[in-house]
Every structure is written in C-alpha cells, then in structure tokens.
Image: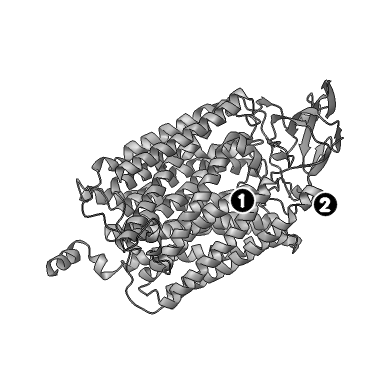
C-alpha cells in the first residue's frame, strides 16, 4: 500500500510541477501572462484624466493601434470599432463606475476593468469578421445589454 | 460479549441508547433550515435556467439578478452552513458521547443569530435593495441592512466554531495522551478553517457598512474584492472537507470495510487546513493591480491544494477496491460490482467522489494563469462549481441524510425510502451532467455567466450558444425535481418514517493499523502555520493595494 501510494503521490506532484513549469514559461518567457496592468486613476475624474479624456482609436505604428476605452453602466466608449485585418491592438481601459469585464468571445481577450485601475490587454486580429465585445461581470440591471462590436475587414 | 456490552454502556452509553435527544434537536433544527433553503434556492435556480434559455421572462418585481443573488446566498451560504453545522454537531455529539450543555447553548445562540441574519438579508434582496449577487463586489452598494444581516450570519457561525473548540478542548483535557475520535478531528478542521476564512469577509463587510450608510465617502474596491475571495474560495474547501469526512469515515462502514490509515487521514485534514486560504487569489487572475509574479505565486499556492485531494483520491479507491475484493470481487474491476450500488447511502457519495475527478481537473484549469483567461467569468465556471459543489459536495450531503436523519429522529430508513433515494440520486446526476456539461462547453465558446439574456441582438456567436442554454433549462428542471424528492425524503424521515433504531455508521481501523500519532493534535502549531501561509500570500499584495491605492469609489447603485 505505502509503496503504491508513494508512487501515486510522486507522479501526481511531478505532473503538477511540470504543469507549473509550462505555465511559468508561457507567462514569463513567451509573454502570455494574464492582463495585470498596475496603474491607478481617480475613478471620479476619468473624463478629465489623460488619456481617458479623449477615448478613441489611435494608429501608433504599422497596422498597430491603441484603443483608449472607458466602460460604464451599460456601454463601451468608443463603440462599434472598425479595424483592418492583421491589426495589432492595445486596449487601455478603465471604469467610470462599477467593476466591469471586457471579453471578446472567440479570442483570448478577457480582463477585469475596475474603477480606480487602468487595465491593458493586446490582441492581433488576424481574421476578418464582426467580433462581439461583451461585459462579463455583473454591473447592474442593464448588464445583459452591455455589448458592442469590433469589425475587422 | 457480556463484558464488552457492559463496558460500552459505561464508557459510551450513547452508542447503545442513541443520540442525546437535546443534541439531536440542535442538529435537526439546523437540517430543517438547510432543506427549506434548498427548496427555495432550487426553485430560484430553475427560474434562472428557464429565463436564460429565453423560455420565460421574470417580472420586474422579481428580476433575474434578485433571483441570482438569492439563489447564491441561500444555497452557497445558508444551505451549506446549516447542513454542515447540523451534521458536524451530530458527529461531535456521537464521537464525544454528547455535547457539553454550554456548547449546546452556543449552537442555539448561533442558530438564532443566523436566522436573524438570513431574514435581514433575504428581505433586502426581495425588496430589490441588494441585487449585488453573492460576491457583492463594491462599489455596487446594497442597503446597509444587507451587510448587517451578513454580520449576523457570520456571528452565528462563529458561535458554532467556539462551541466546537470548547468541546474539543474539554475532551482532550479529560483524555490525556489520547487522540480524539477521527470525526471530531474532522470537525475541528472544518470549524478552524471556517473561523479563519470568515475573518477576511468580516473585515470587508465592516468597512462596507459605514460606506453604504454614507458615513465614509469611498472604499477601496480592490481590497474588498481580495478579502471577499479570501473567504469565498475557502468556503468551497470547507464544504469539501465536510464531504471528505463522510468519504473517509462513513462510506467504508456502509460498504462493510475499514477506513484508511488514520495517520494519513489526519495529514490530509491538516494540509487542507493549512494550505487553503490563498487559493482564493485565482479568482483574480485577470484583475488589474496585481503583478504577474504575485499571480504566479498564487497559481502555485492554489495547485498545492491538489496534493491532499490526490491523496484522498488514492485512499478512497484503495478502500473501495480492498473492500470489493474482500467481498469476493475478482479480476481487474470485478470488485466494483461487489459494492452496494443499490444502497443510497453509498451510491450518492460514490457519484459525488467520481464527479470530483472532472471537478478537480477543471479546478486546475481555473487556477492556471493563461487557461483562466480563456474561461474567466464564462459559463465554464458555473459548470465547474455545479459539478464540484452541486455534485461532489451536495450529493454527499444528500447521501448522509439517509442515515443521519433517521438516526437523529429515532426512525428507520425503509427499503422504499432507500429506493426513492436511489431515484433521487440518478435524477440529480443526469440533471447535473446535462446542465454542468453544457455549461462547460458553452463557456469555452465564450458565453458569459451572471447575465440574464445573452442574445446580444442576434449576433452569430451569441446565437450559437442558444442550443446549450436550452440544455441548461432541461437540466435545471430535472434538478428541481431532484430537490423536491430530496426535501420530501428529508422531512419524511424526520417526522413520518417508522420508529426504530438506525446505526451511525463509523468505520473502524484495520486490525493491524497503527494508532494515530499524538503529534497530529497540535492544533496550535497548525494554526501558526495557517497564519504563516496566509501572510505569505496576502501581506505583499494587500500592502501594495493599500499603499498604491487609487482614490476610492463612492457607493453606486446600478439596478
């Protein structure tokens, strides 16, 4: 019994360690870590604080864009974004009221956007289409209506 | 024989005479509240399933988010807490041969406090003053009475914690050099974890009360969220520890076997108590304001909880196989056939244990940085906790009912009731398999959780989710049928089943087993280690969140 159990525990802990190494390698070597931006903002003065005083899309390089976005109950500013195929996009976001989520189904974009904190996440849109953007954290009675689209063509 | 019987009467009269009626009353009262909450919570759950599938539209005076808040709090807090206390106090009373009268008094005080708290919270939810969901993330601000009600619930749980600590200490003092009965050791683990888990959320709630009253202007939303998950995820592992007490100690007796090495069982309990609390951080993997290196540390800390779970998996299948072979099972899997599949007291916890295999694997996905980003706040997570809590924990609780309730009410489990229990177990299993299975798949396709309607103007990706949402509705309906059968069974066994004697099934150790080592009783040391692990996990991020805090958020009502 004890021998078998030792093998079981050794193998399973070994699997967990291998798993940790893969997750760590992806996070720190390949830059695939989760969105974790650490910059703060006064949640009651978002409209007067740069860059959120001027939300929108800026081309910052060759087919590379920055989208400065504010989230509030129950919408995204700017909304109905249009981008060219292959665009590398850096989203810079904050919330003007409660905690929201920023998710684009079909991609790995999934981040919490909280009042007082600036969140950043990047993605390259390689396929054309109309992407659905949704808030995936309950934010009030109209939460289910909080969505927009990104059209890539 | 004569000799041993007399000895038993002298040393442990409750074994012969049944449970102390005063202690039984405590447990039965808690269990009554538990199953009334289950019934209400279950009805609310089905309403959500139907609305989500677009089959019904809830009226404006009882909207989806009110229903969701009540479903979460009634089932995740009220049902599990009252069941746990009812069951663990019965275990304690049985192990110690009766509770101390002051401990019984504490349990009644706890009962009253919890009831007051639950009423306050429920009224606020019904009045639509607290549609903030189970997590009540600030700056969503509920009515102050909602938070005050939560304080009462926590105080009630603490009263029960102190009751367990007092009785445990008393027994140890009167039995020097002995280890406590294993079920009492489990109870100690459960209530210590509960006490330390609730400290985080209590601090959060105490900061939210003056803020929601307008006495304080702003609050730190990040710290609030972190303190919530300190509690929120540990709670999950409290349920799990309660369920494993039945897996390790009750199930082997029901199948006619012996329990696993007590030293190992105790080691598993100690590890679960020490390692648990930092697991909550994996709910914040895609949050801003926490660095990737801190998040990686928490991936490690969450995964470490898998180690005692893997030890449990080994132990349980070891006991099942050994017992099956002893009963004449041959070949590689012949022992499986020898297990009492027609006995609900075995069937329900067995399915619970099996579902912990996909449940645990899903949990490893949830805790891993990149994979979490794929499934965070999608229906996947809802599917995950419906197979872990909804099956691994709840089916174990249901299985416990079929011996615990007749034992407490001095009645019998009739063959007919056993059959009802078996049917209930299958209805539940099929319902959960359909609902949680489709939730997992559609979560991977991006369907968000906690959203009343996910049609998004008919966008094609949202349309692709609809067939799965129909399956939620079917599953949720089956589950409500399961709830109704279970509630019927519980109250039938409590008040109407034929009078008689029911055994309290506690497994014995193997004949050649070595006794449990006394060092496992060093709870002071385990608590120091628990606090050390909490400090490792929380001091750096929380200090960072406070020192580098943004200006706070005012209370906001968006419903």
Q: Earlier in the sequence, mark 2 or mark 1?
A: 1
Horizontal and vertical percent position of residue B309? 43, 45
Q: Judging from the image, what secondary structure is the residue with disc 1 in? A: helix
Quadrant including the N terminus of chain B: bottom left
Instruction: Report crowding for label 1: few under 14, some 14 to 19, many 20 or more residues within 10 A (C-alpha).
Output: some
User: Is residue B20 at all visible to an observer of this figure?
Assistant: yes
* Residue hosting label 2: B458
Q: Decide if residue B17 is on the left or right side of residue B378.
A: left
Residue B116 vertical placement versus B3 (above, below): above
Residue B1 vertical placement versus B293 (above, below): below
Horizontal and vertical percent position of residue B527? 37, 38
Residue A11 vertical placement versus B501 (above, below): above
Instruction: Report crowding for label 2: few under 14, some 14 to 19, many 20 or more residues within 10 A (C-alpha).
Output: few
* Residue at mark 2: chain: B
User: Is residue B133 at all visible to an observer of this figure?
Assistant: no
* Residue at mark 1: chain: B
Horizontal and vertical percent position of residue B50? 70, 62
* Residue hosting label 1: B382
User: Please, which residue is most extreme toward the front here?
Assistant: B331
Q: Judging from the image, what secondary structure is the residue with disc 2 in? A: helix
Residue shown at the point (37%, 64%) measured from the top left = B338
Q: Decide if residue B195 is on the left or right side of residue B78.
A: left
């Amino acid at each position: 019994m004890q021998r078998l159990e030792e093998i079981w525990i050794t193998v399973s802990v070994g699997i967990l360690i291998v798993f940790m190494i893969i997750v760590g390698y992806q996070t720190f070597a390949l830059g695939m870590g989760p969105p974790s931006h650490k910059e703060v903002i006064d949640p009651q003065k978002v409209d007067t604080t740069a860059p959120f005083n001027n939300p929108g899309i800026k081309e910052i390089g060759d087919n590379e864009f920055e989208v400065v976005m504010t989230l509030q109950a129950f919408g995204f500013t700017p909304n109905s974004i249009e981008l060219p195929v292959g665009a590398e996009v850096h989203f810079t976001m904050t919330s003007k009221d409660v905690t929201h989520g920023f998710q684009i189904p079909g991609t790995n974009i999934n981040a919490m956007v909280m009042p007082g904190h600036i969140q950043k996440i990047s993605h390259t849109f390689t396929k054309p289409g109309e992407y659905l953007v949704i808030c995936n954290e309950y934010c009030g009675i109209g939460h289910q209506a909080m969505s927009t689209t990104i059209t890539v063509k | 024989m004569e000799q041993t019987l007399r000895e038993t009467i002298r040393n442990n009269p409750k074994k012969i005479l049944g449970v102390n009626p005063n202690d039984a009353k405590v447990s039965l009262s808690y269990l009554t509240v538990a199953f009334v909450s289950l019934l209400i919570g279950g009805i609310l759950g089905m309403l959500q399933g139907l609305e989500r599938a677009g089959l019904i539209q809830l009226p404006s005076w009882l909207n989806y988010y009110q229903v969701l808040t009540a479903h979460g709090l009634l089932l995740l807090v009220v049902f599990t807490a009252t069941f746990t206390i009812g069951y663990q106090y019965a275990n304690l009373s049985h192990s110690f041969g009766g509770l101390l009268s002051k401990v019984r008094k504490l349990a009644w005080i706890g009962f009253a406090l919890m009831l007051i708290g639950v009423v306050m919270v429920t009224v606020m939810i019904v009045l639509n003053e607290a549609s903030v969901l189970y997590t009540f993330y600030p700056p969503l601000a509920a009515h102050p009475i909602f938070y005050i009600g939560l304080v009462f619930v926590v105080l009630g749980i603490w009263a029960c914690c102190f009751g367990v600590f007092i009785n445990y200490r008393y027994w140890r003092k009167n039995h020097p050099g002995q280890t406590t009965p294993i079920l009492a050791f489990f109870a100690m683990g459960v209530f210590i974890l509960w006490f330390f888990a609730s400290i985080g959320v209590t601090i959060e709630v105490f900061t939210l009360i003056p803020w929601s009253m307008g006495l304080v202007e702003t609050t730190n939303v990040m710290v609030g969220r972190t303190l919530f998950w300190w509690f929120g995820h540990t709670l999950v592992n409290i349920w799990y520890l309660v369920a494993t007490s039945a897996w390790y100690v009750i199930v082997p007796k029901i199948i006619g076997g012996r329990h696993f090495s007590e030293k190992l069982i105790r080691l598993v309990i100690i590890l679960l108590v020490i390692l648990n609390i930092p697991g909550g951080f994996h709910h914040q993997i895609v949050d801003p304001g926490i660095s990737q290196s801190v998040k990686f540390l928490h991936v490690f800390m969450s995964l470490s909880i898998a180690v005692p779970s893997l030890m449990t998996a080994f132990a349980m299948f070891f006991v099942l196989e050994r017992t099956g072979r002893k009963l004449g099972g041959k070949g590689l899997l012949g022992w499986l056939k020898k297990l009492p599949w027609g006995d609900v007291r075995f069937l329900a916890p067995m399915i619970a244990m099996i579902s912990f295999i996909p449940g645990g694997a899903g949990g490893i996905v949830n805790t891993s940085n990149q994979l979490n980003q794929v499934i965070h706040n999608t229906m996947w997570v809802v599917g995950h906790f419906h197979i872990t809590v909804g099956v691994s924990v709840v089916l174990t609780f249901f299985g416990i009912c079929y011996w615990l309730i007749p034992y407490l009410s001095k009645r019998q489990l009739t063959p007919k009731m056993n059959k009802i229990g078996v049917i209930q177990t299958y209805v539940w299993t099929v319902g959960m398999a359909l609902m949680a299975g489709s939730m997992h798949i559609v979560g991977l396709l991006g369907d968000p959780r906690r959203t009343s309607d996910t049609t998004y103007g008919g966008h094609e990706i949202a349309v692709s989710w609809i067939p799965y949402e129909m399956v939620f509705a079917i599953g949720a309906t089956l589950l409500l049928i399961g709830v109704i059968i279970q509630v019927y069974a519980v109250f039938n066994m409590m008040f109407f089943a034929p009078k008689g004697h029911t055994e309290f099934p506690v497994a014995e150790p193997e004949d050649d087993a070595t006794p449990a080592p006394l060092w496992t009783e060093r709870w002071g040391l385990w608590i120091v280690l628990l606090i050390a692990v909490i400090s490792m996990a929380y001091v750096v991020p929380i200090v960072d969140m406070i020192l580098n805090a943004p200006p706070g958020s005012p209370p906001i009502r968006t419903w």
